[in-house]
Image (cartoon, rainbow, N blue to C red):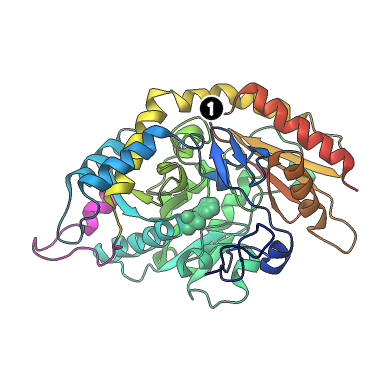
Amino acid sequence: MPADSGDNQPDMSAFWMPFTANRQFKAEPRLLSEASGMYYRTPDGDPVLDGCAGLWCVNLGHGRLEIADAIHRQLMTLDYAPNFQMGHPLVFEFAKALTKIAPPGLDRIFFTNSGSESVDTALKIAMAYHRARGEGQRVRLIGRERGYHGVGFGGLSVGGLVNNRRAFATLPAVSHLPHTWDAGKNAFSKGLPLHGADKADELERLVALHGAETIAAVIVEPVAGSTGVLPPPVGYLKRLRELCNKHGILLIFDEVITGFGRLGAPFAAQALGVVPDIMTTAKGLTNAAIPMGAVFVDRKVHDAIVQGPEATIEFFHGFTYSGHPAACAAGMACLDIYLGEGIFERVAKLAPVWEEALHSLRGKPHVTDIRNLGLMGALDLSPRDGAPGARGYELLNRCLKAGLLVRYTGDTIALSPPLIVSEDEIARIVDILGGVLDEVA
Ligand code: PLP
């Protein structure tokens, strides 16, 4: 078994990397081999400031002993128990504990193992809800252009990123709202952009086209993340909520990124003052120490499905690892940290510092827009002639050499540091980015 190929690199041929240019990466690998607090370390020992919380998920910083200890203890007490027709005490305790930070009414929780599974679960709950109420013809799902809802067939169908969709068949009854970004009117907005609430009115057009009685749910990210951080226009989410109410359509917020403190409240629903019927989460739920997702469901939706003869399974859906004991233990430890360290309040306090720091990059070469909300942010760069994405990729590599991990999609650079980031570290992120922007041709 060759452990390495002779130059201290592991043999990389067997691992088919997700969402990666495999051959390009393997020709010039970027490896991270250790992490603690706000920093990764490369195999050469170089520190790398984590500007992305891994992949929007390590909200509490790396190497949290409390989480590792809780997982270890749980594995030695009860490593696994099925939750199909059986149960273990911790999963009930954890679900109950999560309801304490949930938006009002969303106090029924279905566990999954990822954001994608949470999304597909939520879409199925929406259809099951309407069917249980005698409206089984409501199967149409409405997503949004530039949305990202993971890679299951449900999530990819309601998602709106063309590269994720073009090679695959998608669900038949799916429509999309327009995305909310309007560079002409909103470029360099701080926080929520002022223009575009009327984009929610497109839902009326879809209702007029398909009939409200065929539509099960609308799903949106409160702040579109993976497409490059698009905060919702002022009033947009409220308008969507009103229209969904008017037409009996369920509103799903995909809070896989915005959940667990990213916007300075437990969820975007609280930060932005609009409560959906169903909320999908993952990532920060366990600080990514162990995979887990959770779908928060309004009690009326749950109760409509969980009825009928008591001996009958009400919802034919679930995963072998739904509510895995080790993941529940990790989640409990995270919840203690979120609440014990006042993480949500901390983010709310830091958000204006983050905003000012990011917007100080306005005027740097190639920067065409800067967006921010909570501790999320993004910069758009003008693409290089004939080579879209090349400038973003160069920026990623140069930042890494300078000791900063950023995320790029095309020519957009996204930032979402762990929520324990200090003001000095925010300054450092912006300092490195500014220096690299000056260098990038
Ligand atoms: N939904 C949103 C909003 C996401 O940002 C992501 C991942 O980034 C997902 C769903 C999918 O999550 P996962 O990669 O855990 O399946």
Residue 163: x, y in percent?
Answer: 65, 68
The residue located at (31%, 70%) in the rendering is: 136
Q: Residue 78 magenta-drawn?
A: no
Residue at horizontal 86%, vertical 34%? 363
Q: Position of residue 122 (x, y in %)?
A: 38, 58
Give the vertical position of 164 relative to 83 (above or below): below
Q: Which residue is mark 1?
A: 347
The magenta stretch is 297-320
Q: Please provide percent x and percent y for residue 367.
A: 83, 42
Residue at 51%, 23% in the rendered image: 346
Regarding mark 1 in the picture, which secondary structure is present there?
Answer: helix
Considering the whole magenta stretch, tell me its main secondary structure: loop
When the figure is inspected, residue 255 is found, relative to residue 152, above or below; the finding is above
Observer-nearest of 371 and 440 = 440
Q: Position of residue 217 (x, y in %)?
A: 43, 59
- Would residue 328 be seen by someone viewing this image from the given angle? yes
Q: Amino acid at mark 1?
A: Val
Question: Against 440, is 389 above or below?
Answer: below
Q: Does residue 250 appear to the left or right of 365 in the view shown?
A: left
Answer above or below: position of 268 versus 409.
above
314 magenta-colored: yes
